[in-house]
Structure formats: C-alpha cells, structure tokens
Amino acid sequence: MRFDITKVVSLVIVVMLRYCKGLSMNYYMMSCPMADFIVKNTVNSALRSDPTLAAGLIRMHFHDCFIEGCDASVLLDSTDTNTAEKDSPANLSLRGYKVIDDAKQQVENQCPGVVSCADIVAMAARDAVFFAGGPVYDIPKGRKDGTRSKIEDTRNLPPPTFNSTELIKMFGQKGFTVQEMVALSGGHTLGVARCSAFKNRLKNFDSKNDVDPSIDTQFMKTLSKTCSAGDDAEQAFDLTRNMFDNAYYNALQRQSGVLTSDQTLMADPKTRPIVNGYAMNQAMFFFDFQRAMLKMGLLDVKETGQVRQNCHKIN
Ligand SMILES: *[C@@H]1O[C@H](CO)[C@@H](O)[C@H](O)[C@H]1NC(C)=O
Ligand SMILES: *[C@@H]1O[C@H](CO)[C@@H](O)[C@H](O)[C@H]1NC(C)=O
C-alpha cells in the first residue's frame, strides 16, 4: 500500500473545515495568549464565591448559540429602536453577565479589540463545567460578535413544556442527534428551575396529555411545596445542584425530573436507553456532553464581523 501524503493532508483539511470552520484551538496564541487564562481565573474566582453561577454561564452559552448562532447576541442590551433577547422572559434563567463583563474588561486591558464576547461566553461555559466537577475540554476560538438581537428570536429556545418528540425535532433542526440532545439536557445537572416553568405539571393531567404523567408522588409533594412560595420559587434539578455529575439522570429514573422536558426523556422509549446509560455510566455522559458542547459551540458561528468593545452594545 502506498502512503499518499496529499490524501492525508486533504483529509485533515476537510476534517478541520468541517469541525472548526475558521476557528482554531490556538486562535489567540499570538494576538492574546493570556485570553484563556484570564477567562478561567475570572470564572473560578466568581464561582468560588457563588457556585450557583456555573449553571447560569452554561445556560448563557446555550441560549446564545441557539439564537442567531454563538455570537454573543444574548449579551446585547435593548436600545430605543430594538428590544433585545435579554428582555424576553427567557432571560430569567440567565445569570453571570457580570462574570462575562469582568473577563472582557481584563482581556481588553491586555489586548484591546481582539477577543470576541462570543468566545468569552463559550470559554466561560467550558470553565464553569470543569469548575463544577465536569469534563475538561478545549474549544476552538475565533467567533465574531453578532449585531442582531431580537426578543422574538427567543421563540427558538426549547420551552420547558416540550415533550421528547418536540425536543428531538427542535434539536434536530440544529443538527443534533437524539443522543446529543439527551447529553446536552444533562446541563441540568447544575442549577434550578422556577415554579413557573413546571407548575403545569402540578395540575391534574387531562387524558389528552400524552407526556408521561407518572411523577413520583413524594416528588410531586416537593414540587408543590416549592410552588407554594410563588412562581419564582426555585427547585433544584437534582440532589447535587452545584456539582456536575450524572445525578440528573438518576433523578429521571426515580420519576423526579423537574420539568416536562426533563422527565419526558425517561418516558420516551427513544431516549430512555440513553438516560439509563448515562445514569449508569458517568464517564460516558461526560464524553458525550463534552462533544455535544463542542458542536453546539460551532452553531452558525460568524467568522467575519466585529469584536465588540463592550459586550452590551455593537461597535
Ligand atoms: C435580564 O437579566 C439581567 C441580569 O440578570 C438583568 O440585569 C436585566 O434587567 C434582565 N432583563 C429583564 C428584562 O428582565
Ligand atoms: C408531543 O407534543 C406534540 C405537540 O403538543 C403532540 O402532538 C405529540 O403527540 C406529543 N408526543 C408525545 C409522544 O407525547
């Protein structure tokens, strides 16, 4: 067999283009070598004083990428003529803006105008996963910041009331497999939901509702108790809300998922084996999660465009 170097090289190029577009792991190696380090330090020190921010940072990256691609549109403030994503009710689950602002400011001090807000959001999510005990992984960088942020675009986020058929469809439209969707749902290993997001489950199920009505009786009482404190009362997704682990999937096995969109993954025979697999094998969850996050971080990224000076507004 002849070793054909041109074939190997072209294969490598195809793979790079396919997975990394114009981005690369060491995109800032020359222009801002401290970028990763600065973001990691900022995230770590913020999470040391408030570990609950980890969930917010992961959620922010997800929200950013699902709308208009990973372009920091989620950070733009509304203006006189435009109502931004930020002002949608979906904003309620977003936290950690200050962490991003802090990191951006420090990076700007080192290398002004170089590191995009979109990359900082992606790096912060990565660092939050690791801080909370999840997998370590590197991500390609080189995203540019977008200029569009519209409140109506947030309808492209999966609502908490979705069943697994709807989730598979919505994630599928973004190019995710069923398995990747279930792995990304595991981001709920961190954080809380508000009562307003799950109180639909506390009413009696009508017979037309084909989402699995089986919810653990004891857990139903827990949810009701949470909601007795009002719509904004918070319920942790699993027993270890600040720890990145597979306890979320164990909760689903106990019929103790918080949202319809959580428990449906256990109810649907298409997703149940994946839930059971992750519940049994945390390493497998970590592996799949990290790969799915990498893929999510490349959704509709902009390779040309601006690097915002201030993440809150376009230049
Ligand atoms: C969105 O969230 C940020 C940070 O929590 C907050 O400052 C802002 O007022 C929120 N916007 C709305 C409309 O709730
Ligand atoms: C999921 O929800 C859709 C829309 O409400 C509904 O048409 C469908 O029957 C549901 N599927 C399952 C499996 O629950």
Image (tube, helix red, strand yellow):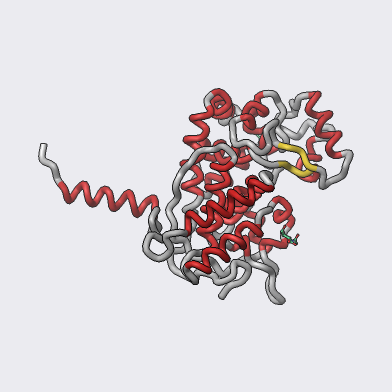
Q: Is residue 292 above or below residue 77?
A: above
Q: Residue at x 45, y 50 (%)?
A: 139
Horizontally, is 189 left or right of 224 in the view?
A: left
Question: Depth check: 277 or 118 in front?
Answer: 118
Q: Residue at x 24, y 51 (%)?
A: 10
Furthest residue to the left?
2
Measured from the top left, where is residue 17 in percent x and y?
34, 54
* Corner quadrant of residue 192: top right
Question: Depth check: 119 or 181 in front?
Answer: 119
Quarter that holds the C terminus: bottom right
Measured from the top left, where is residue 107 in percent x and y?
52, 64
Q: Is residue 38 above or below residue 210?
A: below
Measured from the top left, where is residue 47 in percent x and y?
64, 47
Q: Residue at x 58, y 26 (%)?
A: 279
Q: Is residue 158 above or below residue 276?
A: below
Q: Residue at x 19, y 48 (%)?
A: 7
Q: Quadrant of ligand 1?
A: bottom right
Q: Is residue 304 above or below residue 51?
A: below
Q: Is residue 123 visible?
A: yes
Measured from the top left, where is residue 109 in percent x and y?
52, 68
